[in-house]
Amino acid sequence: MGRFDELTGILPDTADVSDAGHLTIGGCDTVSLAAEHGTPLYVFDEVTLRGQCSLFREEFGTRYDDLRVIHAAKALLNRALVRLLMEEGLGLDVVSGGELSIAKSVGFPTENVYFHGNNKQVDELELAISSGVGRIVVDNTYELGLVDKLARTHGVRQDILLRLSPGIDPHTHQHTTTGIVDSKFGLAMVTGEAEEAVRRAVETPSVRLVGLHAHLGSPIFSTEPYEQAVAVMLRFAADMVAKHGLDFREFSPGGGFAVQYTVDQPAPQIAEYAAAITEAIASSCRELGLDRPRLIVEPGRAIVGRAGVALYTVGATKDVPGVRKYVSVDGGMGDNIRPALYDARYEAIVANRMNADATEKVTIAGKFCESGDILVRDVQLPSIAPGDIIAISVSGAYCLPMASNYNASLRPAVVFVRGGEARLVRRRDSYEDLIRNDLV
């Protein structure tokens, strides 16, 4: 059946092939969806989204009593997803006033929001504190001062975590490595900066330091960096309890859980991450005499990545004999910049001819005026013709949040599918959208 069988662990849970040989997701024919809504089109399977939420709750929750799972909004955020997350009982990790405002627009409980970011602006912190966000994850001493001042102005005591740099290399792409010493994120432990921040926070009446946070990077294809980070962070926590009276109630090892993008690079199961992290916490707490803190985990990509599939329509092709055959589609780096930015790799299939044998190696190119606008290199597909619908799997994370109007292109529409029904959750940009904020 074409490439479908080898991609079943990469496509959404409900992916299937219809009698017509079309890719279906959530009981909906993707070729029909492309015809109705145009392409590029991003299709999200609600069953997969909810299933991933449940897996994180269950795999971590059965191993650790005091748990909070919060979705990392930077991976994907829209109002429909926020409603789904509320229904699934997840919290939310935001990194901007914009993300917080999207959450508030559908009534997301702000006490379940954790506000991250390395350079939060005053107006963003003002919005967060006035909105009653549950935690501000303080990234640096400058920000600690801002939170102190704003909290005093509002007459509140703001709960915070401190984000630390534990000096752990997760061995991922340099642009997505965040827990090492040479990083813009976090308070460095090796320099004494982290300890000084703990001391100041404990002594500041307008904030309540309730825990510590680390984020190592993303995607992390091994459990070992988490285990190392837990040991380092909890040893530091125990030291801060003894020296400065830290009230250590919460601990977050961050997110960064990998997903499988290609058939040749499997990712650990959620259960493997859960077992490694919870066992490391239990072991360190026993060794150090610490009470076990509430565990906060922050999956983003692992919630939404596999649930999303991007659909494109084929246009021109260019065959360079003995070199490469380019197949151009009507999207590209404007809606998915990850291949250009991170050398990200994907799998692709022909959604309207799922049963056809893969007979040629092609490279799928975008329509943007950049030589680096390549979506998938050297993938085996059936012979391609203009009008074919290309589906790129595992497109649910980071593609849409980093989408742009480069070349004055229109950002794509988004649909959620379930039980044979599709609902439009984001309309495609219009030309009017491109010019509505310009002044002449």
Image (tube, rainbow, N blue to C red):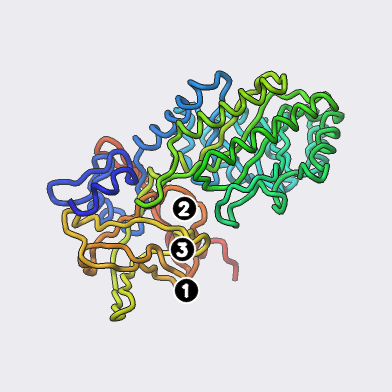
Specify whether 372 is left or right of 363.
Answer: right
- Which amino acid is tagged 2? Leu
- Marks 2/3: CA–CA distance: 9 Å
Q: Which residue carries the number 1 mark?
A: 370
> Vertically, is 322 above or below 241?
below
Mark 2 or 3 closer to N-term? 3
Crowd band around label 1 with a 10 angstrom C-alpha radius: few (<14), some (14–19), many (20+): few
Residues marked 1 and 2 touching at CB (< 8 Å):
no
Residue 159 lies, in percent from the top left, at 72, 29
Residue 274 lies, in percent from the top left, at 51, 30
Mark 1 or 2 closer to N-term? 1
Which numbered mark, 3 or 1, is in the foreground of this view? Answer: 1
Quarter of the image where one finds residue 228:
top right
Q: Which residue is nearer to you in this view: 337 or 120?
A: 337
Q: Which mark is residue 334?
A: 3
Taking the spot 34% from the left edge, 56% from the top edge, the residue there is 347
Q: Secondary structure at mark 3?
A: loop
Q: Secondary structure at mark 2?
A: loop
Is residue 144 visible from the viewing direction of this image?
Answer: yes
Quadrant position of the C terminus in the picture? bottom right
Residue 121 lies, in percent from the top left, at 72, 48
Is residue 77 visible from the viewing direction of this image?
Answer: no
- Which amino acid is tagged 1? Glu
Q: Which mark is residue 400?
A: 2
Which numbered mark, 1 or 2, is in the foreground of this view? Answer: 1
- Which amino acid is tagged 3? Gly
Crowd band around label 3 with a 10 angstrom C-alpha radius: few (<14), some (14–19), many (20+): many
Specify whether 169 is left or right of 199.
Answer: left
> Vertically, is 197 above or below 285?
below
